[in-house]
Amino acid sequence: MNHITGKIVFRQAVTRLVPLILLMLILLPGRAEAQNEGKQLFEKNCMVCHKLGGGKLVGPELVGVTEKREHDWLIKFIRNSQEMVEAGDPIAVQVFEENNKVPMQPFPNLTDADIENIIDYIKNWTPEAKPEFTVDINKREGFTAEEIQTGEKLFHGKMAFENGGTQTCVSCHYTQNINNLDWNPSIYDLAKAFMEKDGMNMYVSLTEPTSNVMKTAHKEYKLTEKEMFNIAAYLSDYAKSGQEVKSIKKFPTRLTLFIVFAVLMTLALIDLIFTKKVRFRAIHGIILVVGIAVHFNIAMVEAQNLSRTQNYAPDQPIKFSHKVHAGDNKTDCRYCHNIADYSKSAGIPSNDVCLACHEVVKEGRNSGKFEINKIFRAKNSGKPVEWIRIHNLQEHVFFSHAQHVNAGKVECETCHGPVEEMDIMRQFADLSMGWCVQCHRDTDVNFTDNKYYSTYQKLHEELKAGKINSVNVEQIGGLDCMKCHY
């Protein structure tokens, strides 16, 4: 009887557990998928302003917010916080005031399911366990020659990675500059960032890349700890060697031409006077005439170009694209160069100007986080970013941005060219005296509606009388020598 009773109890237990197990098998993958969707939505929409475990960023820390706030209130607040603030919701107003009255972006594009997934992700978020390494990831010096050599082979593709990978490190992290903007950091950039105090943690970057650019670029790579350690050894050695990335040098065509004709003219003169091997004297004459013409042309052009640096485009410490900022994002030139209205110089932006945007925008769509992180590293070091000036007039020339930008209402692109199309900023005009003079002769000034020119009574009278239709810069003294050469 007891045996029969045991079987009945077992069958009843199995009958009850099987549906429960089946239900769990059905729900668990869906739960995991929803959590993953919530993570992706959070990283795309929320992570710019909020942290999970790490304190306040632009907005408040979100760990524990699902316990502090009601679920329905959170949904409404995420959807449109400002609408709740304007309606006088006391909690929304309190949150708004506690965060310096910085308005939170509304999210009309998110569905109710999207917001539910975000809230669920925040509620169930737990900090990821820090990876444990069997090598010294903080080592920056003291590598052996064998470790450095192995790292060099791995970086340059002379030795295959243990877990595969179709491209070498050097195929992206270049050792020689090209004329267009390569968004990938160079080997020198990597080495410098690796060696800086509190600089790049290569092990974390390779095992847990935080930017979408790096996630895509390193998707197929699963480097072992020893491989990363050896590459670190190579970068350490490279940084110490001071081998900065070299620019590709153009073939010196004009210099070669000058030397070739100098040699030919010398030979022609020697033969004409002494050896007399060539019977036709006309050949000597042609060589001498052509050579003198070539030499005269080269000398004239080089003399004209003395101290002129048209198309000068130096490598900047940060890969800053004017095309992205001024072109794609429509950033006004005077937001960054904010003293152009009242100063002789347009000014070089300080770290704080950059951080006004990049405290929020921490990842570029082309460069990921590497270039933007240079601003934060400069801030932490207490040193400014050492931008290289591109437009340099001679010391004996006076030029005022305030005069041109403020009083003259001259647009920036008049002198600097189509900046909004330039990834690599270059000197657009030759900045020669002739170029300036021609502009002053051709350019009409905004004369009638500009208080700056109110003292030019005679010209105002001539405009009113119809004697002249406009006033150009030349007519108000723009060609006086002492205006520019004081």
Image (cartoon, rainbow, N blue to C red):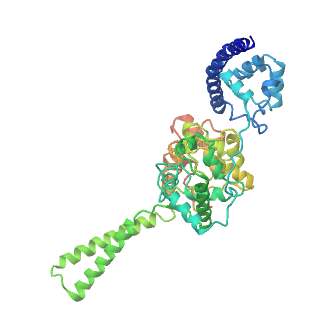
Q: Across the whole image, how many numbered discs are drawn on residues?
A: 0
Residue 178: image x %, image y %?
47, 55
Q: Can you give x and y, in whole percent of width and height, for residue 410 in the image?
A: 57, 43
Q: Classify 136 as above or below 70.
A: below
Q: Nearer the viewer, residue 377 or 466?
A: 377
Q: In the image, residue 152 lies at what x, y percent?
A: 53, 62
Residue shown at the point (55%, 55%) measured from the top left: 186
Tell me the residue at 64%/20% (across/down): 27
* Quadrant placement of the C terminus: bottom right
Say whether residue 483 is visible: no
The residue nearer to you, when weighing 365 against 132, is 132
Vertical side of 290 occupied by 201: above or below: above
Asked if residue 101 can be seen in this view, the reply is: yes
Quadrant into which the N terminus falls: top right
Q: Position of residue 229 (x, y in %)?
A: 62, 57
Residue at point 71%, 45% (across, down): 130
What's the residue at 66%, 52% (across, down)? 200
Q: Nearer the viewer, residue 244 or 19?
A: 19
Dividing the picture into quadrants, the one containing residue 57 is: top right
Looking at the image, is 401 positioned above or below residue 176? above
Residue 392: quarter of image: bottom right
State the residue in front, 69 or 316.
Answer: 69
Could you tell whether 16 is left or right of 481 in the image? right
